[in-house]
Amino acid sequence: MNEELKAHLEFFEELGVDGVRLEPEWRARREPAEPIEPNEPIEPIEPNEPNEPKDPLRIIREELGADCSRCKLHTLGRTQVVFGVGNPNADLMFVGEAPGGDEDIQGEPFVGRAGQLLTKIIEAIDLRREDVYIANVIKCRPPGNRNPEPDEVEQCQPFLFRQIETVKPKVIVALGKFAAQCLLRTNDPITRIRGREFKYRDAILIPTYHPAYLLRTPSAKREVWEDMKRVRAILHGE
Ligand code: URA
């Protein structure tokens, strides 16, 4: 068996997939994205041409500001604000909790180990990372990757809400307890809300386990795969 196919099937097995699809679209799926190089330079924001309509995500990003000081995280060792990345017109949006160490350095959400697993999860439903939009509830790294605190969430979540309003995804996947609780305004544990679908404005919200949890608890990958199959079906209008 060729090496690439072997790696692909091994990953599916890791996810708990018990079979593969034989439809031509599946076989014609695109190559996985290149691995992410650490410490890639962050693209500078180019100035808008005069009279060019402003990109709405860019307006939000500028309002948030590259040196945001709305909450205490700006004094607690963050390197930079990590805004969001991906297709500004994506049908599918992932929402995580907060940047970790790798994201804080690279300025992009989900680029560390959990992020690499997220990329594989995206590819498992025949999409590429650049097809979707990825953001976090809070945009700065909490020290030592501690949980976000309520005042931090309070200050930062309006920017996430505006990102969602702008991208207008059909499906939002809330990764883990913090994202799910923030978007659904509930204190219910993730174990109670996962496996269900919720309406979030014009989108369908699917809560699932955070990829960092999957790294610690690989057996939960099977449930995430169930959730992702549902995401794919909704995106295909099924
Ligand atoms: N965990 C998150 O919730 N977000 C990231 O961007 C990285 C890890």
Image (cartoon, rainbow, N blue to C red):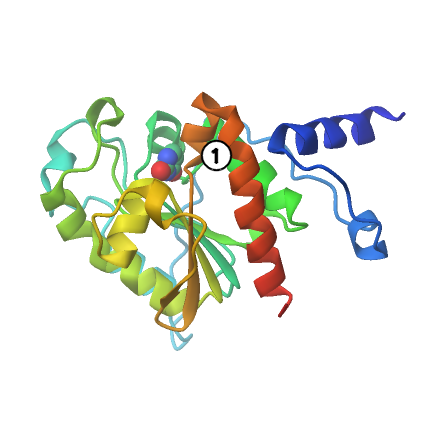
- Location of the N terminus by quadrant is top right
Q: Please report the residue visible at 36 percent of the width from the left and 41 percent of the height from the top.
A: 191
Position of 231 with respect to 144 (left or right) is right
What residue is rendered at 33% in x and 43% in y? 190
Residue 212 visible in rendering:
yes
In the rendered view, tell whether residue 52 sits above or below residue 210.
below
- Look at the picture and state if 12 lies above or below 88: above
Question: How far across and down, in percent of the image, does residue 195 sit?
Answer: 45, 50
On whether ligand 1 comes within 8 Å of the CB at mark 1, the answer is yes
Judging depth in this view, the residue of 103 and 18 nearest the camera is 18
In this orientation, which residue lies closer to the viewer: 196 or 71?
196
Q: Secondary structure at mark 1?
A: helix
Above or below, 27 against 169 in this view is: above
- How far across and how far down the image is residue 204, in percent? 44, 65
Question: Looking at the rendering, in which quadrant would you find the C terminus?
Answer: bottom right
Q: Amino acid at mark 1?
A: Gly
Q: Nearer the viewer, residue 148 or 206?
A: 206
Q: How many marks?
A: 1
Residue ID at (32%, 50%): 180
Q: Residue at x 30, y 56 (%)?
A: 61
Residue 172, compared with residue 208, is above or below; it is below
The residue labelled by disc 1 is 115
